[in-house]
Image: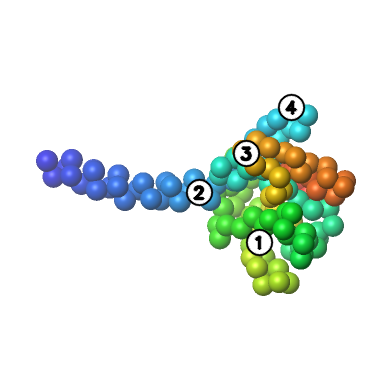
Amino acid sequence: MKALTALFVAALLLLPAAAFANHHAVKIAKKDGIGAYLTDAEGKTLYWFKKDAPGQSSCAGPCIDKWPLYYRESVAPPEGTTAADFAVITRADGKQQTTFRGYPLYYWMNDASPGDTGGQGINNVWFVIDPAAFPPK
């Protein structure tokens, strides 16, 4: 009986850790016409901005209304990437933002559902991130 109780308690202690890890997981999705791309734990597409530089965001003011920042204090990386690929920067406006291989990550305001990729190619400066080919040369 004691062993069963100990097992039950251990399982209860692990559940929050598993939920935390999933909440902070970045995933790789695939879509015809898009290929492989990064998403958050809920399947919402993550984008990069061609005008950004490693460690620095050029999207400010009204831009972040259209392109909300992606931020997690830590990220559980998907297969094919490492924890070192992800970091956090403090932007000029004082907000924190998660980066992938140095480049800040964003959402597109019009992507309402997991799997939406409506921000791909906007103004030829916003793109999904294929981790196998990022950053582009």
* Mark 4–mark 1 distance (CA, rounded to whole Å): 29 Å
43 relative to 104, above or below: above
Q: Between disc 3 and disc 2, whose residue precedes?
A: 2
Residue identifier under label 2 = 23
Question: Of helix, strand and loop, which one carries label 2?
Answer: helix
Residue identifier under label 3 = 113
Judged by depth in the image, the label closer to the viewer, 3 or 2, is: 3
Q: Is residue 47 left or right of residue 88?
A: right
Q: Which mark is residue 32?
A: 4
Question: Of helix, strand and loop, which one carries label 1?
Answer: strand
Residue drawn at (38%, 50%) of the image: 16
Residue drawn at (23%, 43%) of the image: 7
Residue identifier under label 1 = 97
* Mark 2–mark 4 distance (CA, rounded to whole Å): 26 Å
Question: Of helix, strand and loop, which one carries label 3?
Answer: loop
Q: Between disc 4 and disc 3, whose residue precedes?
A: 4
Q: Residues within 10 Å of mark 2 (few under 14, many from 20)?
A: some
Quadrant of the rendered image containing residue 71: bottom right
Q: Between disc 1 and disc 2, whose residue precedes?
A: 2
Q: Residues within 10 Å of mark 3 (few under 14, many from 20)?
A: few
Q: Is residue 109 left or right of residue 3?
A: right
Q: Between disc 4 and disc 1, whose residue precedes?
A: 4
* Mark 4–mark 3 distance (CA, rounded to whole Å): 17 Å
